[in-house]
Amino acid sequence: MTIPMVSMITCTTTTMPTDAQVMKLAQWLSPAYPVGAFAYSHGLESAVAMGTVPDAAALREWLGDILFQGAGRADAIFLAAAYRAPDAAALAELDATARAFQPSAERLLETTAQGAAFARITGAVWPADLPDLTYPVALGRAARLHDLPLLLTARMYLHAFASNLVSAGIRLIPIGQTDGQKVLTALTPLCERVAEEAMAETLDELSSTAFLADIASMTHETQYSRLFRT
Amino acid sequence: MRLAAKARADGSALADLRQSGAFKALFPRPRDGAVDAILVNTAGGITGGDRFEAQVEARAGSHLRVTTQAAERAYRAQPGERGRVRNRLAVGPGARLDWLPQETILFEGSALERTLMADLAADARLLLVEPLVFGRAAMGEVVHDALFRDRIEIRREGVPLYLDALRLHGDVAADLARPAVAGGAGAMASLVFADPGAEAHLGPLRALMPATGGASLLRKDVLVMRLLAPDSFALRRVLVPVLMRLTGNSLPRSWMT
């Protein structure tokens, strides 16, 4: 995938995040934050079993598609819309839309289970009323309540998403830790670019064309031997 | 065009039909209590500036089956022009609507924006399929420059039940060649079956799927399927048995030719 240079335009219009904001996002999006991300492969387990993702290069391409034109971009759009939702009713409608947009039962589980866990732990540590929401909607809402910068939240969300799937790939394919980190490093500019583009996109521009990733999440439902929930 | 079916003591009947422009409807003899409607685009296809709108309604207790006479063709559009297709479906209490158009074929240079909105009553049933073909493989056509935007929104009593949205722009063939996109497939079908008995069809549908297809039960009463195939012929070979099963062997005849 060719990755054009990230535009610098938005840097002039957003204020620099404070250290405290960065630290809070690092905590929320760390693999140690108990949302259970390690249990979800987003269909990768099935794609590996079918031979579609045999090595580090294929993992980079597969995850690049998901970030650029699959759940990555769509989640960033949902996250931004949640951040900007004017009231509880708008948030609820948005969350219903995010649920309806899931292409399979396991992908619905992936986003609702992580979203519920995120809302539970975040609402308990920093007492606030966070309802059960899909993961990007819950994060967008929490970022708004905590007055965290939206673009950084979206970038770090996509980076955590990619990082988690790289870890899944390291275990499943398997590939070495060094190769895994090289894949993540190659995907990082794409996380930044998609997050930035999604800031300007509304729900009308939602699109998901990672069809084979969606199909892999469906075939995973009947996979005989599984390490992952999705 | 507007088209509605209603329930009668002896089955379903046509309740309303208004046609204008190039869209016409044909009605073969009713079968098994349902109204069959065959939509015909007398213009022979969609080009840049075209607007097509259909409002299709299965009123309380009725059963309406809609298909097209032939594959729809989205032809090359003039620069800056886009063809627009808007379909609105409504399914009333206890009613069933089968929305079974044949393939939409996107030609090189085409520009098409399509929306389908469906409103279901609490106990309404809907079977929906949208087959897509990217260029005419048999003619050696590859789609290197096209625009296609599609959105399917299904709501039950106003609550979003299913949403599918996709944008393809530019070198569609190169995009479809990507590993997590379509792996080089030239045809695709999306299917939704909203029905209290949907769950019973999950196993049989899975068994019909090739490696490039999948079925899943999103909710107890919502079954979805996505299928990729090299071309429209290979797509049909999988899709026709699926549709035969979900229509109870009442797939419209125009599908079988």
Image: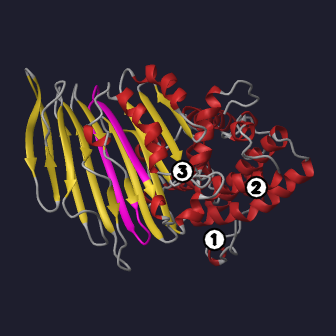
Q: CA distance from mark 1 to mark 2?
A: 30 Å
Which residue corresponds to the image point at 66% horizontal and 40% vertical from the top-left? A42
* Spot occupied by residue A103 in the image (x, y as percentages of width and height): 52, 40
Task: Specify how the rendered protein is coloured.
Answer: secondary structure
Q: CA distance from mark 3 to mark 2?
A: 25 Å
The residue that disc 2 covers is A60
Have a look at marks 1 and 2 and say if they share a chain.
Answer: yes
Could you tell which of marks 1 and 2 lies nearer the N-terminus?
Answer: 1
Compared to residue B46, the image places residue A139 above or below, namely above
Chain part drawn in magenta: B106-132
Can you tell which quarter of the image residue B7 is in?
top left
The residue that disc 1 covers is A14
Have a look at marks 3 and 2 and say if they share a chain.
Answer: no
Residue closest to the eye, B21 or B133: B133
Q: Is residue A92 magenta?
A: no
Give the amino acid at mark 1.
Thr
Can you tell which quarter of the image residue A197 is in?
bottom right
The residue that disc 3 covers is B230
